[in-house]
Amino acid sequence: AQKITQTQPGMFVQEKEAVTLDCTYDTSDQSYGLFWYKQPSSGEMIFLIYQGSYDEQNATEGRYSLNFQKARKSANLVISASQLGDSAMYFCAMREVNNAGNMLTFGGGTRLMVKP
Amino acid sequence: KAGVTQTPRYLIKTRGQQVTLSCSPISGHRSVSWYQQTPGQGLQFLFEYFSETQRNKGNFPGRFSGRQFSNSRSEMNVSTLELGDSALYLCASSTTGHRYQETQYFGPGTRLLVL
């Protein structure tokens, strides 16, 4: 079974609107971290936001927030006030406490396209 | 602080050759991980090093190897290149990699094309 599932291969959003990118995960660990990364066409993976499994509050970083629903095993990324520069691939990733070494497991990604 | 650097940025090789990619982590970071990204398989974990020791290895053949030096810089090597090795190779660093909460910061990647 997929550990990280991103069901939206591609999405369009109008500039200045908010958009939600979906991520569901599967783990039997009680302790884990969830990460979102942005990958522009240049290829570099840019860290956006982190949510820990024990964090009671949803994480926020500027225009990025994470809608964390632990019981449903979902960690959706919300981007408010979309900008043209937000057009990129977005990846959800998980680090489980019982992973030997520092391994991130990634979802398949969502390509976000912001329309002017 | 300087970010993660990777060299070279682009590489073209032919089947059967070998290649070495280099990664310099953020200063003070001692954990270095390598990932392969392809359109078909997505992002896959190759291996991770801490204090010159490989702590974990992904499901890749023995042609893929790596090492880490005492200054935390890391190299990965692919021998006997195959067409399917064409990919973006990403390196990431974090402070120790001991805690699941640690953020990994990625370099710009090396794009390898095997002809």
Image (spheres, coloured by chain):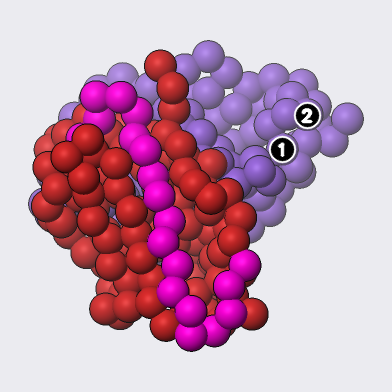
Foreground residue among A55 and B9: B9
Q: Position of residue A48 (x, y in %)?
A: 48, 29
Judge whether A90 appears above or below A1 on screen.
Answer: above
Gap between marks 1 and 2 measured at Cα? 6 Å
Judge whether B102 appears above or below A9 on screen.
Answer: above
Image quarter (top left, top right, bottom left or bottom right) of the N terminus of chain B: top left
Please state which amino acid type lies under the numbered disc 1: Ser
Q: Residue at x 68, y 53 (%)?
A: A10
Chain for colour red: B
Magenta stretch, residue numbers: B12-31
Please state which amino acid type lies under the numbered disc 2: Leu
Foreground residue among A84 and B6: B6
Residue A72 seen in render: no
Residue at the right extreme of this rendering? A116
The residue where tag 2 is placed is A84
The residue where tag 1 is placed is A87
* Residue A33 quadrant: top left
Q: Position of residue A43 (x, y in %)?
A: 60, 46
Chain for colour purple: A
**Mark 1 and mark 2 residues within 8 Å of each other at the beta carbon:** yes
Foreground residue among A113 and B78: B78
Q: Could you tell me which secondary element the residue under label 2 belongs to?
A: helix
Q: Residue at x 43, y 56 (%)?
A: B21
Q: Residue at x 24, y 24 (%)?
A: B28
- Chain hosting mark 2: A
Q: Position of residue A45 (x, y in %)?
A: 51, 41
* Residue A12 quadrant: top right
Q: Is residue B71 left or right of residue B20?
A: left
Question: Which mark is drawn over residue A42?
Answer: none
